[in-house]
Image: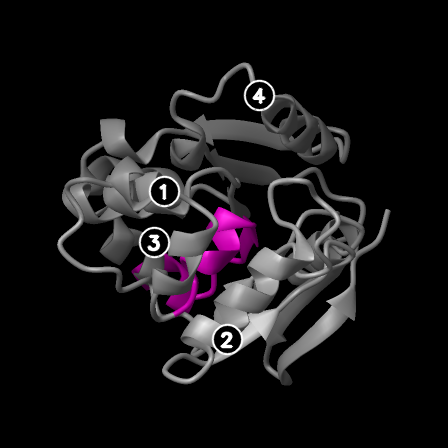
Amino acid sequence: MRLLLLSWQSGALAPFLADASGAPDRRLTIGYVTDAQAGMAGAPFVAAERARVSALGHEVREIIARDVEPNQLDATLGGLDALYVAGGSTFALLEALKTTGNDAVIVDHVRAGLPYIGTSAGSIIAGPDIAPASLMDDPADGPLLRDTRGLALIDTTVVPHADGLLPPYPPELIDRILDTYGVDHRLQPLRDDQALLVDVRGARVVASGE
């Protein structure tokens, strides 16, 4: 598997895509999952995140997982070079995937070799459990969730924005998350200029500053 789990800054994204594709100059087709941003269209971070991905010059195809059947998503993912899962509400995102069965579709494709990129919420759901995100995001955003189990593509739960520089996530909140959930969960804090890279060499934190 190849995964790049970003906190916020995306400096590691272009090298990851070039390496994963094996052809640095080829224009890729990237699926862009926006379910975490339902109801957030006017938020500045939504446009900023999309602009960073689009600026790489690849074809970006929006995917709203809650609106497609698993067989449709399966066909769509089969035509992609990489999948990008955008940030926003972790609970809204996981609800969209699990209530449709599209979580299993994504897991199957990623385990079969489709490169996976997540930012913030998209990174958190790649782990075994999103419960630690309940202090960052509102669990009420996913009222139909029966549990908080993530995609389990990795065995740790990313804690993004761990440097506490973004106003919604001050240092004391990050400390609360680590203290509250660090006993029962394997946590991987990431500063906003870091990412967790997973490939054949294992998992390691890499620089991702812009």
Question: How far is the residue under mark 2 from the one under mark 4?
Answer: 30 Å
* Mark 1, other Cα within 10 Å: few <14 / some 14–19 / many ≥20: few
Label 4 vs label 3: CA separation? 26 Å
Q: Amino acid at mark 4?
A: Ala
Going from N to C along the chain, the mark reached first, 1 or 3, is: 3
Provide the secondary structure element on which disc 4 rests: loop
The amino acid sitting under disc 3 is: Ile
Answer yes or no: is residue 112 visible.
no
- Mark 3 or 2 closer to N-term? 3
Q: Earlier in the sequence, mark 1 or mark 2?
A: 1
Say which of marks 2 and 4 sits in front: 2
Q: Nearer the viewer, mark 1 or mark 4?
A: 1
* Above/below status of 69 relative to 178: above
Q: Nearer the viewer, residue 37 or 3?
A: 37
Which of marks 3 and 4 precedes in the sequence? 4
Circle on res. 138: 1
Choose mark 1 or mark 3, whichever is in front: 1
Mark 1 vs 4: CB contact within 8 A:
no
Judging by the rendered image, the residue that carries numbered circle 4 is 43
* Circle nearer the N terminus (1, 4): 4
Give the distance between the C-alpha atoms of the residues marked 3 and 2, in whole angstroms: 31 Å
Q: Are marks 3 and 2 in contact (CB under 8 Å)?
A: no
Residue interval drawn in magenta: 108-127
Percent across and percent down for residue 148 are: 26, 60
Residue drawn at the location 70% of the way across and 37% of the way down: 27
User: SS for tag 2?
Assistant: helix
Among numbered discs 2 and 4, the one appearing first in the sequence: 4
Q: Which residue has dot 3 on it?
A: 106
| Rendered location of residue 38, percent (x, y) | 38, 25
Residue 8, position as x, y percentages in the image: 68, 47
